[in-house]
Amino acid sequence: MTRDQRYRWLFKPLAFAACLVPLAWAIAGVLVASGVSLPALIPVPALGADPVRRVLGIFGKTALNLLLVTLSITPLRQLSGNAHLLRFRRMLGLFAFFYALLHLAVYLLFQSFSWPEIVRDITRRPYITIGFTALLLLVPLAVTSTNGMMRRLKKRWQTLHRLIYPIAILGVWHYWWQIKRDIRQPLLYASLLALLLGWRLWKHWMDRSRRSSPSDLT
Amino acid sequence: MLIRRPDDIRPSEITPESAFLNRRATLAALFGAGAATALPRAFAAEGATPAAPPAPNLTYTKNARYTVPNDTPNSWAEVTGYNNFYEFGTDKTDPARNAGTLRAKPWSVEIAGEAEVRGKFTFEDIVKPHALEERIYRFRCVEAWSMVIPWVGFPLGDLLKRFKPTSKAKYVEFTTLLDPRQMPGQSLPVLDWPYVEGLRIDEAMHPLTLLVTGVYGRELPNQNGAPLRLMAPWKYGFKNVKSIVKIRFTEQQPRNSWNVAAPNEYGFYANVNPQVDHPRWSQASERRIGGGFFARRQPTLTFNGYAEQVAGLYTGMDLKRYF
């Protein structure tokens, strides 16, 4: 197998399967919590006494995790020089969107599909407003993620897809704002995001200063 | 004080004990397919407790006056495995995992402030003179989930009277144990430890207000606030301070931990009120724990369904302001 084939036929399918694990885990948990018995070999997650809230959290966290992983592709590529890493980016980004949608779906269930309540939440509760905004902003990115769209939009594609930065910030903010007191986890997410965005700023600034005054560096 | 019998409960509405103990099996039969074994497994994996309560180890009478019509108590696993007790961690499953370090025996409680009788009392001094009774109360967390729980305890007012509060005793302050070695969560500054809470003296003396020593007929498990906790069922859960080591009668309104942490989100009164939302979520409805993944929310009742007994305590008060 050439390196190219290994990525196409081995690593990408593996990453795809890995991205489905949280979904499979949640489904198994819900089945068990609803009284369906699964074969003993399957590790059964314990969703505990409040399964809806738990699954809501699993999907939200997974969306956030995948957003951060997507954002780490570029720095990792630059640090390692491995251009193959870029092939994972679209898939990871689309999975982040997929889990954000699932998170929304479970939230609707969490609110018993009470639409007046849901509209009130989205318009009046800031942390839900920003979470919903982040999800809406992901839609154009998902829609324009195809090769055809990439070709058609040319330079504008990259500009549009820089939306991922504010989306990630809104996502972490959405998480932070609903925590009652113990902010250790959201702080961790915020730090990782700051690192990933900071890396880009630093790189950008270094490249520019290198271009403008190459003699200073000698 | 006259204990009024709430008129919304008829004996025919009280669920027989055998029925509520068997509710999981009943549900399992409805869903079919091996649920009876699958459900306990879900909890066993959590490292917590079995769904069925162990045998009672307290002597008490069941007070049939206090029960929740058309509803069954939550399971032992839910009551003892899903707790907010930040002294043992901020996740709902942390207390069941971490509360083993608490030494609930021996225990003593300091009585202080505006009362004729003050000093240090052992747990036995506090509890022995009182007859324990079981009362089934609604429990409503400020986070908009709820349970129904069979507590064992006695009216707090009966205890407070023994200390002969003076005319200056307008409030009662309760303090939880402070000891990061026994309560590892206290090594993090999540709240301003120790946890303190307070009630107005008439709230504390109200016949609904219990000093709880047990649940499901057993001594309180550590994660539920052993060995002594408060239960004022018309207030949000956080008012019901756990593992109490100090009771102080005061003239001024005491501080309460969540109000100190976020004054715009948690008030002193914290009466369950579907009309007054938390700034970040609605209090109009609640999710009953144990209903399963697809359970619908249910409307939250004013004063958590105890309006008839307690609304009189707040006549003329603007409950939107004093939330």
Image (cartoon, coloured by chain):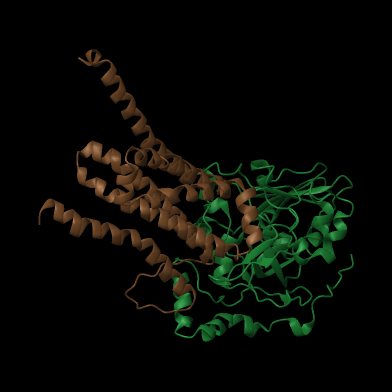
Chain colours: A brown, B green
Which residue is at a point 37% across and 51% down the rendered structure image? A66
Q: Quadrant of the N terminus of chain B?
A: bottom right
Residue A148 lies left or right of residue B61; in this view the side is left
Q: Foreground: B312 or A113?
A: A113
- Residue B164 position, x and y percent, is 85, 53
Q: Quadrant of residue B301?
A: bottom right
Task: Residue B96: tell me if it is visible.
Answer: no
Residue sitting nearer the eye, A197 or B85? A197
Front-most of B40 and A7?
A7
Q: Position of residue B221 (x, y in %)?
A: 58, 64
Question: On the rendered structure, is B45 left or right of B205?
Answer: left
- Residue B286, by quadrant, is bottom right
Residue A59 % position (x, y): 45, 58
Image side of residue B167 versus residue B252, left or right: right
Residue at horizontal 87 percent and vertical 70 percent from the top = B4
- Residue B32, placed above or below residue B126: below
Q: How many marks?
A: 0
In the rendered view, would you say A175 is above or below A11?
above
- Residue B174 drawn at (x, y percent): 71, 50
Residue at the top extreme of this rendering: A215
The image quadrant that residue B65 belongs to is: bottom right
Residue furthest to the left: A1
Q: Is residue A151 above or below residue B122?
A: above
Q: Residue at x 33, y 37 (%)?
A: A155
Residue closest to the eye, B301 or A218: A218
Is residue B154 found left or right of B82 in the rendered image? right
Can I make out residue A15 in this image?
Answer: yes
